[in-house]
Amino acid sequence: MNNTNKFLKTLQERRQMAFFFDMDGTLINSMPYHSRAWTAIMQSIGIDFDIKDCYLEEGRTGHELLKNFVKKYLKKDLTEAELQQLYREKSKLFDHIQKVQPIEHVCDVLQFIRNELQAQLWVVTGSGLEDLWERLNGYFPDVFGKDKIICAYDIKQGKPAPDPYLTAWERSGLPKENCCVVENAPLGVLSGKRAELFTVAVNTGILENHYFEEAGADVIFPSMEEFLAFLQQ
Ligand code: MG
């Protein structure tokens, strides 16, 4: 039996399950604004960074993204203070330009998981926003508990390392086969697969599907609507 059939069997048997949702590009349509903010910040320090870089690198924590690109293109290391300063500037710019909404049909998916499957709902993100839960609760009132968010401060190594999803899995208290990662980014898919969890890619962005196949996604959907139909079958 392949992974997808095993997962569907777990669903149909109505076992206790947990869904681990990435945030940016999976729950909320924030990626266009992140891309614009990152491109502006990187270009301000002389790094030729474009929108596709942002989608390909998505999932890393902001600090890791900055460190990697500065090392690669400027051949130097940033001090902790410089890193924090740049990340603050990027966050400020993001806040200034963002008009974020939930991803289309994701609220229906969350409702189905909560009401029909009665499964645990987690957010697993590399974001380091200090008011993360307040923001999430604004977009999705009373859906995510404060104790079910794994963010940049909970882990040592961000995606594509398995740590974020492994941490969520450990805290869920469930067997791995009862868990499902939902991602929109190749590095996030890689993180889910390295944690040996069933990983769904919902391609809400600009990348071709082969990036998700190469990262090892168990199944790829073009929209949350298609993911919902899969869960409801
Ligand atoms: Mg994402």
Image (cartoon, rainbow, N blue to C red):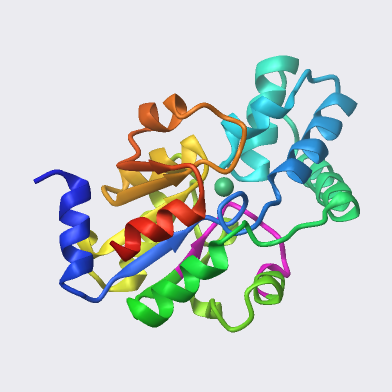
Kindly tell me whether residue 229 is visible in this rendering.
yes
Q: Is residue 80 visible?
A: no
Residue at 65% in and 35% down? 65
Name the quadrant containing residue 55. Answer: top right
Residue lying at 85% horizontally and 25% vertically, measured from the top left: 43
- In the picture, measured across the screen, residue 41 lies left or right of residue 153, that is right
* Callout count: 0
Give the percent coordinates (x, y) of residue 145: 53, 80
Q: Nearer the viewer, residue 193 or 81?
A: 193
Q: State left or right for residue 151 relative to residue 183.
A: right
Q: Is residue 12 left or right of residue 141?
A: left
- Residue at position x 26%, y 47% from top? 196
In this rendering, the answer to whether 17 lies above or below 35 is below
Segment colored magenta: 122-133
Residue 114 within the segment the image draws in magenta: no
The answer to if 128 sits in the magenta stretch is: yes
| As drawn, 15 above or below 156 | below
Quarter of the image that includes the C terminus: bottom left
Where on the picture, by quarter, is residue 86? top right
Nearer to me, 155 or 10: 10
Report x, y in % for residue 167.
39, 61
State the residue in front, 118 or 44: 118
| Depth check, front residue: 95 or 88 | 95
Instruction: In the rendered view, tell whether residue 101 sits above or below residue 77.
Output: below
